[in-house]
């Protein structure tokens, strides 16, 4: 018989944490030491596109990232594949025994591309694993709660399973079943909010988040203080600021949380430096701008890399773009924008 492959393509956007996740209590299941909260970007902006094909003629599972074949035996990739296939099998057995079983035994070929620099601290793994899990679920006909599976690919990926404002509740259970992402507000909630990414360097980050977190959990007493005594209150305050659309409160919490995250990196031994000179200049420009207006109009946040993500309201974008062009001319680091990113679209398509 003809062997037509079954092909599914999906996209998933990057998310930017405003209350950062840093540190695992369980490495295998990827369970965090604190809850976190993020904003999912617009679908058409920074995103991963994944195409998965299944065919009876495929001999083995294979994966290509940005055109280059990678090792399919990567443990976290294997976790996602295993979990989706397990759910598919469960669904077939429990709900609908008549469901065709051939698809389940078929091997997959996965092609995934990012439209932005990988591993430059732009949360590429978040969009990547969210997209992988969502696309696999489509291929194998799995529905329902998928964030706990995306979480096992990359912690931050669970938050890219939803649009808008998303919290990852750390959970308490040892099996991780309650460590899930949950939408706080939909993408339509705050249409005036804008994000701009300033590229301070497109190089690969020196210390990946996995090993960085491990060293921080082992050596930083500040991280323990942050997880136990700071983040719980900050999550509540951040959710309130988002719900009220209180930009100044949202912005101040965002900057303080980014600063504390990078302080825990400095408190790690040996220390981890994610911010560079350009990042520090961007921080200074933001505070000068806010001081000039006597009002918090801008917020910065940095993940595990030097690139800045700046939050502002729509009406302040043109002026801020001019300020950036003044301090960071186009050829220089910092002078390269990725895009003005509205936050008003669903997470997955
Ligand atoms: O999901 P990971 O392992 O790539 O870790 C992400 C960590 C930060 O981006 C620094 C913070 C966050 O909450 O996204």
Image (cartoon, grey):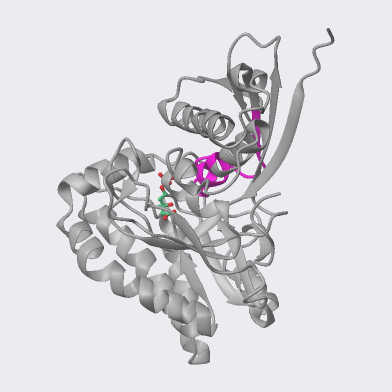
Of residue 323 and residue 127, the one placed in the foreground of this image is 127
Quarter location, residue 238: bottom left
The image position of residue 284, as x and y in percent, is 43, 72
| Residue at 21% over, 50% down | 268
Above/below status of 260 relative to 305 = below
Above/below status of 256 relative to 7 = below
Quadrant occupied by the N terminus: top right
Q: Is residue 152 visible?
A: yes
Q: Is residue 154 left or right of residue 63?
A: left
Above/below status of 334 relative to 108 = below
Above/below status of 244 relative to 82 = below
Q: Give the total of numbered labels.
A: 0
Q: Is residue 210 left or right of residue 63?
A: left
Quarter location, residue 231: bottom left
| Residue at 46% over, 87% down | 291
Of residue 88 and residue 60, the one placed in the foreground of this image is 88
Of residue 30 and residue 56, the one placed in the foreground of this image is 56
The image position of residue 131, as x and y in percent, is 60, 41
Q: Is residue 287 visible?
A: no
Quarter location, residue 266: bottom left
The image position of residue 157, as x and y in percent, is 49, 47
Q: Which span is picked out in magenta? A: 111-129
Q: Indicate yes or no whether the magenta region holds residue 327.
A: no
- The residue most toward the bottom is 294
The image position of residue 163, as x and y in percent, is 61, 60
């Amino acid at each position: 018989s003809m062997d037509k492959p079954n092909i599914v393509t999906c996209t998933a956007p990057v998310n930017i944490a405003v209350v950062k996740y840093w540190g695992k209590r369980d490495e295998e299941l990827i369970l965090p030491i604190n809850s976190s909260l993020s904003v999912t970007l617009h679908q058409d902006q920074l995103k991963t596109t994944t195409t998965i094909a299944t065919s009876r003629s495929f001999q083995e599972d294979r994966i290509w990232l940005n055109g280059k074949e990678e090792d399919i035996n990567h443990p976290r990739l294997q976790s996602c594949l295993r979990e989706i296939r397990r759910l598919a099998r469960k669904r077939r057995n429990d709900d609908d025994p008549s469901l065709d079983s051939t698809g389940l035994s078929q091997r997959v070929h996965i092609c995934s591309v990012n439209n932005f620099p990988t591993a430059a601290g732009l949360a590429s793994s978040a969009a990547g694993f969210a997209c992988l899990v969502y696309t696999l679920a489509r291929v194998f006909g799995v529905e329902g709660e998928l964030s706990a599976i995306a979480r096992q690919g990359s912690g931050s990926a669970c938050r890219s399973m939803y649009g808008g404002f998303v919290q990852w509740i750390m959970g308490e259970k040892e099996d991780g079943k309650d460590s899930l992402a949950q939408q706080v507000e939909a993408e339509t909630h705050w249409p005036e909010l804008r994000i701009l990414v300033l590229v301070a360097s497109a190089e690969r980050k020196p210390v990946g988040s996995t090993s960085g977190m491990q060293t921080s959990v082992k050596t930083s007493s500040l991280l323990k203080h942050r997880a136990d005594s700071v983040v719980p209150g900050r999550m509540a305050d951040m959710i309130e600021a988002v719900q009220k659309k209180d930009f100044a409160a949202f912005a101040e919490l965002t900057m303080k949380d980014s600063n504390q995250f990078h302080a825990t990196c400095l408190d790690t031994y040996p220390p981890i430096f994610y911010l560079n000179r350009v990042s520090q200049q961007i921080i200074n420009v933001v505070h000068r701008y806010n001081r000039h207006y006597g009002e918090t109009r801008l917020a910065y946040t940095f993940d595990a890399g030097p690139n800045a993500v700046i939050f502002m309201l729509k009406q302040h974008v043109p002026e801020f773009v001019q300020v950036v062009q003044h301090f960071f001319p186009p050829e220089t680091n910092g002078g390269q924008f990725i895009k003005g990113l509205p936050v008003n679209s669903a997470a997955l398509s």
